[in-house]
Amino acid sequence: MKNILWIDDEIDHFKSHILFLEKKGYKTTTCKSGLEGLDIISKNSYDAILLDQNMPGLSGTETIEIIRTHHSNIPLLMISQNYDNDTVEDAIGLKISDYLVKPLNPNQILMSLTKIFRKKEIISSKTISNYQKIFLDLNNKINYSETIEEWIDVYKTLTFWELELCEIGEQDIYEILLSQKKQANKLYSNFIEKNYKDLIHTSNYLSSINLFKKKIVPELSKNHSTLMILIDNLRFDQWKSIEPYVIENCHIKTDLIYPSILPTTTQYARNSIFAGLSPLEISNAHSMYWINETNEDGKNKFESELLNKQFIRLGLKNNFKYHKISNSKDGELFLNNLNNHKKNDLTVLVYNFVDMISHAKKDVKFIKELASSDKAYRELTKGWYNNSKLNDIIKKAKTLSFKIILTSDHGTISVEKPALVSGDKEISNNLRYKTSKQIHSTKKEALSLKEPSDFLLPSNYLSSCYIFAKEKTYFVYSNNYNNYVNMFKNTYQHGGISMEEMLVPFIVIDPK
């Protein structure tokens, strides 16, 4: 039985209400003033407190202020005779659980108490029930999806339910969802293996290559400034975790997922976004801006130059500025100068922090602890965003009436299954894809590509091939095998084939 304290100078008028609550399992203690209530609270513990606003002596809000200094976690329900705006705002500011207006219906009080004490239980039960209802339909979608649009819908649905089930903490049900997701990634990999060559050569297939032309250029205007923010390595579920903070006081104009090209890495996908060309076309047309795998130089040093070439090729007259932020100092500088960017039709901002989290996970022990699961990875992203310069930049951009485009170049996946790979000494280092003159790996665990041009990829040698890891596989060599298996297992990697890596958020928001 829950113990309730009800403080009201007219408590004698509520005897029937108290009897009703007692029948529903709430033992109710009463008193007639704030001072009396504070004395009772100092000697006894209560699960919730109801208190009237208009009492002689201490008012309800004054009593709450004192209660909060010593008992910050007790749920408080304010009772008042009216919806006086100042009183309501004062009560809300004191973090009350509910605000009830006289005359009181006993069911009204019961509903508030039920919301306090059984909210999580009720939400959990309803969430599980709703998931059970769609389980078979979702299974059918997973097993019979035949187009990229259908797979995007599957991924959106799986992500929605993953976030919902994570929230209620029912591990058994969550494991069922993860098994569906595992099956989906298996079949999605099969779909990509069978269809990617045709898709990537289809002009209406939205991807990294034509994202700028098809989705960003139509948003540009001489009448307003646009801020395009590309957060490197931001997965769709990570976007959903920070979405409520990003879109506050905004209107979402566009909310979609687009497919990244293979390999799902910054070198390939992001260069293609800014060039508006495939990696093969960049290598051929702008060889001075394409850094081969064997070269130790940075692979994305020329994004501004590639974007400028795309503007010229598309005949765009809009002016743009490009910026890359890799630390808080750069973020602070950009934030302070944001008002100056109002004169640009387009300001491009590449933000690298999320990518650094995933790369650091394999090297730094405490990062591994913080990002030990997808749920923890999302929480880490949320915590980072809320305390980041990017959050400040987006808030300020809203006040300056920028149109904001937010997207990424690729996602990432936590890898679990090692696969042996071998090749010549020039083989690339990425754990989710490899390219070299010759590569050997198990066909079941990798998509093998003998003709790079089929995937619009350049050949680094006269004879080049690529392999791409499927699902949660990662490539390791036989030399020092056990050490590398343990080092990289359950780390976040990208470059291969999975929904998490390939299916990327693209958002356009207009400030209200």
Image (tube, rainbow, N blue to C red):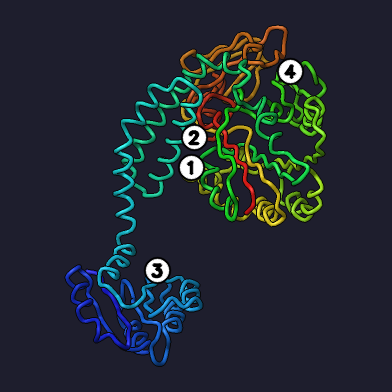
Picture quadrant of residue 103 = bottom left
Task: Pick whichever, 405 or 489, lies toward us.
Answer: 405
265 left or right of 330 in image: left
Furthest toward the top, the residue is: 463
Provide the residue designation for mark 1.
372
- What residue sits right under mark 2 in the picture? 490
The percent coordinates of residue 388 (x first, y second) are 64, 53
Q: Quadrant of residue 19?
A: bottom left
Q: Which residue is mark 4?
A: 281
Identified by mark 3, the residue type is Ser
* Measured Cα–Cα span from mark 2 to mark 1: 8 Å
Position of 50 relative to 396 (above/below): below
Q: Is residue 486 visible?
A: no
Q: Quadrant of the C terminus?
A: bottom right
Q: CA distance from mark 1 to mark 4?
A: 39 Å
Which numbered mark, 2 or 4, is in the foreground of this view? 4
Q: Secondary structure at mark 1?
A: loop
Image location (x, y in percent) of residue 254: 59, 40
Return the disc, 2 or 1, that comes first in the chain's sequence. Answer: 1
Other residues around mark 2 within 10 Å, as few (<14) / some (14–19) / many (≥20): many
Q: Are marks 2 and 1 in contact (CB under 8 Å)?
A: yes
Whichever of labels 4 and 3 marks the residue nearer the N terminus, that label is: 3
Q: Earlier in the sequence, mark 3 or mark 2?
A: 3
